[in-house]
Image: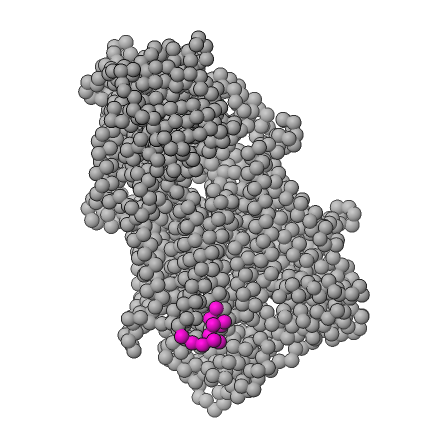
Amino acid sequence: SGGDGGADTAAAGEGAITVGFSQVGAESEWRTANTRSVREALAAPEFDLRFSDAQQKQENQIKALRSFIAQGVDVIAFSPVVETGWDTVLREAKAAGIPVVLTDRAVNVSDESLYATLVGSDFVEEGRRAARWLVEDSEGEAGPIRIVELQGTVGSAPANDRMRGFKEVIDADARFQIVRSQSGDFTRARGKEVMEAFLRAEGRNIDVLFAHNDDMAIGAIQAIEEAGLKPGTDIRIVSIDGVRGAFEAMKAGKLNATVECNPLLGPQLAQLVRDVHAGREVPKRVMVEEGVFTQDQAEAELPNRKY
Amino acid sequence: MTGEPPPSLARRAFAHPLLWPLLALALLLLGNGLFNPGFLSLEWRDGRLYGNLVDIANRAAPLILVSLGMTLVIAVRGLDISVGAVLAIAATVAAWTITRMTTGGGGLAPLFAAIGAALAAAALCGLWNGLLVVKVGMQPIIATLILMVAGRGVAQLISDGQILTIYYEPYRFLGTGFLLGLPFSLFVVVAVFATLKLLLDRTALGLFVRAIGYNPVAAHVAGVRARAITLSLYVFSGFCAGLAGLLVSANVASADANNAGQLLELDAILAVAIGGTALAGGRFSLAGSLVGALIIQTLTTTIYAIGVPPQVNLVVKALLVLAVLLLQSPQFRGQVRALVRRPQRGTA
Amino acid sequence: MSAVPLRGLAQAGGLGRLWRDPRYVSLAVTVSLFLAMSIAGGVLYDGFLRPQVFLNLFIDNGFVLIVAVGMTFVILTGGIDLSVGAVVAFSTVLLASLVQHHGWHPLAAIAAVLVLGTAFGATMGAMIQRYRLQPFVVTLAGMFLARGTATLVSVDSIGIDHAFHVAVASLRIPVGGGASLSVGAAIALLVMAGGALLAGMTRFGRAVYAIGGNEQSAHLMGLPVDATLVRVYALSGFCSALAGVVYTFYMLSGYSLHASGLELDAIAAVVIGGTLLAGGSGYVLGTLFGVLVLGLIQTLIVFDGTLSSWWTRIAIGALLLAFCLMQRLLAKRGGAG
Amino acid sequence: MSDVILHAERLCKRFGATRALDGAGLTLRAGEVHALMGQNGAGKSTLIKLLTGVETPDAGTVTLAGRAIAPASPLEAQHAGISTVYQEVNLCPNLSVAENLFAGRYPRRFGLVDWARVRAGARELLAELQLEIDVDRPLSSYPVAIQQMVAIARALGVSARVLILDEPTSSLDEDEVRQLFAVMGRLRDRGMAILFVTHFLDQVYAVSDRITVLRNGGLVGEYLPADLPRAALVKAMVGREVELTGARGASADALPKGEVVLEARGLGRRGSLQPVDVRVHAGEVLGLGGLLGSGRTELARLLFGLDRADKGELQVAGETADLHHPADAVARGLALCPEERKTEGIVAGLSVRENIVLALQARRGWRRSLPRARQEEMATRYVELLGIRTTGIEAPAAALSGGNQQKVLLARWLATDPKLLILDEPTRGIDIAAKQEIMAEVVRLARQGMAVLFISAEIEELTRLGDRIAVLRERRMAGELPGGCDGRQVLDMIAGHGG
Ligand SMILES: Nc1ncnc2c1ncn2[C@@H]1O[C@H](COP(=O)(O)OP(=O)(O)OP(=O)(O)O)[C@@H](O)[C@H]1O
Ligand SMILES: Nc1ncnc2c1ncn2[C@@H]1O[C@H](COP(=O)(O)OP(=O)(O)OP(=O)(O)O)[C@@H](O)[C@H]1O
Ligand SMILES: [Mg+2]
Ligand SMILES: [Mg+2]
């Protein structure tokens, strides 16, 4: 909890690197794990962490960045809520001579030199991976394979990108067909509700469910069970994130695959901050280690899951 | 709530404030039925009733509960925008209690403990709101805004930011169980609604609530304990949100402190307003709010059922809400009538 | 209605009177509490009392202030406008789309956005007035509509890189001591001043107060109630669109999810600033302080820099509570004395 | 008739089942004060609303200076030259007095409201009515009487051809009424036509040049005061003969005094009332007189627990009573019919029945609901007893005429069968016949053992009704007089000279 962070900050020595970190919020387990990883990695005495939570609002994040600049921190790191709209404030940071490290998501800026580096995942690639798993898994099957899609929050970057990546691969194969697509707002409750409606409208003609995150998939699994079908068998399910709940579902045979989107990038971030502060050359894009997990790996992997 | 004098039955039905919300609901369902013939069908399978109508009622249950509490708060010139956060707190407290207790063993003890703890926490939240409004004299929207902002934080504090998953079957029954072939949540709604109706119609509470809403000063002068009643209505609103929290968390077998009940306050107020309750206080209708909540859920289900692309959802919802509102406005109906009659008058 | 306190000052012997008149007490309390909170921040955190920190309040909350000024008028009539955040988002998306995808000059796009926003507000006002619908529901539908239309224009966020827009966005107006204001903040301050003048010194503004006091009486007194109501919502629509424009200067992007929940921030700012939600009482100047208080709470929390996500929420709630409690208690005492 | 300014003919107006106006008419001439008379609910206010565009007539014509008009809003009527004070104070409580006087027609400079001129103008207007108050304070901080004067001043401020005053004097005391009449006289001499509604016959004969009488929404006739003695006027209004003599028979001293129901010793409140002693016995009517702002309402509020006393002691039926809430007072058998009908009395959204049972129900508590049949029986009884003109007991109180609302309020408190009934200006706005009935009812209740504290601005009412008369002056008790005394004695004590 928050109190520990405070104590560490107080203990930080004079020469510590002051890092201002602006997090998106605490909207999901994934995010909480991400926050925890960053906090733990930057709790070392060599850092002095200023943490700020934006409550999912870009305005708040920009306010936080301005405050960091006003406080004169050494390095700014943040997970952008959205891709656009960062030019002005990043320019201010640059003018103040504060290097910026992006985590988790990319930003769209006119001038690439406005940030030092990005460590994080690629949502489009995650969508592609989910689709590739599906294509492999459907080898030898005859079409049409009817897919329903549970989208994330309308307009959000992960939703847009995961949809794009998924379609890109699926569209190349004529057997696949997305019959219904609706937003489940990244939540279990919505995921369940929307899946119920899908099942009601399509009856038993759904072959595959693609959910933009695990939570919606978990909600949808309940809906499928309540409708008297077997998730994972009657309807194959692939989702993204790789949270603990997804592994449990895979272990129970209810979820077929999850594409990992690894939130534990704290240690990588800490190293980058060190390098950037020391003026060392860093790569512009650092990927987090991620994989695709299926039911056979679930049992072995479950104990390793921290979130 | 008001008992009109009894002229002709037809006239009374026509003037009944529930007529237009009900008509709107009927039109929505009918439209759905036309678009998709299977929509209105009900099916008896494995001793249960299945169908979109059951789904709608079941899904709407939490919203109905919250709207009932909101109706009474609004009736006394208040507002409670913390219901979503209170729902999240109740859900989290319930899940937390269960995770604590089920490690010790099974039985029904965890179920009752969870229900009790969640409802107590929710009622306490309501009491807090009520005290800020009644004792401190804050404006209701700000008083409840405080809990709206902080409440989710408290819920996340309890859950440590995790989605608490509930592996305990008896609890799931609240959200997914069936009784006599109908979803259990419907019984909760009916029980709360009937109790309220009895309480408000058979005792003097309904009269007092309306008196306070129309003219708090006059009610006070007449000896009505306006402040105590207002306070207890906030408690009740919290309690309703707590009940809704139980249903929601039991339905998905987990408590999501951040997302449970997100934007619920808006939907609830919308339901209350569609149901014909005056947001300025005084006139209120519990049945109207119930119908209003059903209308909102039907809208949502309609959007899913007809396969509206997600980016058009909001526009469709907006247009449907506007249509419902206009249908209810006597001025608008008058205008339409005048338009229809004009050609006739020309011939006459 | 800043004009009135000033008048009071000039007329009857300065602050003493201002403090005693119950109508200004709450405003005075709000201002004093804001100052007290700033000083507390200065004591607790290094560098908090730098001028730029306070100017940032205006820079970062400029669009909130603009929206809140429009909202003040709506609330003064006893109404409410929930569509503001959505109209801001819609304006940013439309503006960005016109500039980036359709090759409009930003100035032309700005004009179009302002006209559309005003018309949108006026339409809602006309529905509320003509069909006697409750403002809450009409503007809620308006919120769905505006946000929905924004997603129809584009689900993706659109970055704006037109030279003019970028130049305006990065323009800083120095105010001495190395501190500076953005164009958006300057516009917000102008809107605030204009709003105060409009509320306190014009027939329109006074009609707004009269309607909030008692709509029926205002009608019987021969005030143009219907026209005023429509204009108030049009004004709020205009302010939201203008806030959208300022937002694009702030973010250089248009996005349908921008400014989510802004309506609540704006309402909260207005009410914290001392305006009665029931209508008829309050000051535009109070709204300014409402916005500043909300901004200051954010700033305090960022300066603290140790709070985890949930503690941030609880801290915001607690600071809000502390502020409102003090405000109530002090205003009660001041009003009585 | 060249001097006819406003002429209305065969006006009809229905509200649902109510025929508020049914063929009423009126002729107003330049340079006259014209009294419009009728019982409560006769349609006077409705007629005025039709003339001024608040409501539109179902049938009938209105001509102003020979041209047919159909004002669609009060604003249009104002532009046409009709300035109006409506029956209930219809100003904005949140605005300052000065603003209320000038709203809608502010003097402006460079397009902006010129506040300096607004305030100067406000003081000038009020000075005409000899009223010196702080024009910057919000209107709501003044009692109804002052608000009424402000409303009148606002109407005077418009250079209109027609001035309409709907019961302007009901809440004013004699001094204020005299000021108002002086102003009306001046305006008439300037050629203005003034329409004036009142229930005080004295005032009618004191100022009016002509009288129009309405009954049940229809026109009874137009008369010259000289041709219409009081009895005939009352008969024209009511439709039958009405006994106008005092309701009181025996002199007060002859009555045996019951036990003390309420006793206040040194009861006071900082800033509103100096410590006073009051004692009321069962079976007696204590009249309470005083000028505007003398503290009568404040005393009533203290006795009822609406305000908290910070000095002194209150005993009800021999027991010390610490009243925190009106409910405490109600539980002890006290009742207060408040002065401010609109804000503190009537609950406009509730039906007549609900308004009548409200206080009784509050006393019984929320659990023990009065059976519907008893509510209806009770409401019907009081509607008949007090002659409340309504379409039925389920009609919303908002649909009742002002006087009838006042009767509903009285019924509410009578229904609680209190030990002590405090009536703060209960006859305000009530027609002459109803006033007789109410006063008779008060006396009857007192004879049955109820104690009554009767606050009134009318000395005649006090002397006729009071077994004793207490007088407040400048927020302290000025003295007490026996019932049935000479009105002039009371007047002297109220004004603070002579005694
Ligand atoms: N808005 C309304 N709706 C229904 N009925 C109404 C309405 N306004 C007036 N009435 C009815 O019309 C009748 C005439 O009312 P009006 O107010 O004109 O009486 P009045 O002569 O002014 O009485 P008073 O002396 O008590 O003021 C009454 O019976 C009243 O109940
Ligand atoms: N002429 C006046 N000028 C200024 N303020 C007044 C005047 N008359 C009354 N007030 C204010 O009105 C308030 C209420 O007075 P209160 O109601 O007790 O008087 P009252 O004796 O009941 O007279 P009434 O009921 O006839 O108005 C007081 O606070 C007083 O300050
Ligand atoms: Mg009248
Ligand atoms: Mg009085």
State the residue at coordinates (27%, 23%). Answer: D443
The answer to whether residue D98 is left or right of residue D455 is: right
Q: Which residue shows up at 60% across the image and 63% down it?
A: C309
Q: Nearer the viewer, residue C127 or C10?
A: C10
Task: Work out which residue is located at the far front of the displayed protein and give it.
Answer: D318
| Image position of A182 with respect to C122: above or below | below
Q: Quadrant of the C terminus of chain B?
A: top left
**Could you say where residue D44 lies in the image, as x and y percent from the top left?**
30, 25
In the image, is residue C44 above or below residue D144? below
Residue lying furthest bottom: A140
Count of all numbered marks drawn on residues in the image: 0
Instruction: Tell me if residue D243 is in the magenta stretch.
Output: no
Colouring: one colour
In this rendering, does residue A281 appear at all? yes
Image: A158 above or below A256:
above
Up-down: is D475 above or below A103?
above
Task: Write the start and end of the magenta stretch as one range.
Answer: B97-107
* Left or right for C202, reference D181: right
Give the residue at x 21% y 49%. B10
The answer, for residue A161, to whether it is visible in the render is: no
User: Quarter of the image holding residue D182?
Assistant: top left
Q: Nearer the viewer, residue C85 or C292?
A: C292
Q: Position of residue D119 (x, y in %)?
A: 56, 24
Instruction: Judge from the rendering whether residue A134 lies leftward or rightward of residue A82; answer left or right.
Output: left
Residue D496 appears at what percent x and percent y? Answer: 46, 13
Q: Nearer the viewer, residue C81 or B319?
A: C81
Name the residue located 57 percent from the left edge and 39 percent from the top edge: C331
Q: Is residue B100 magenta?
A: yes
Residue D455 on image: x %, y % = 37, 23
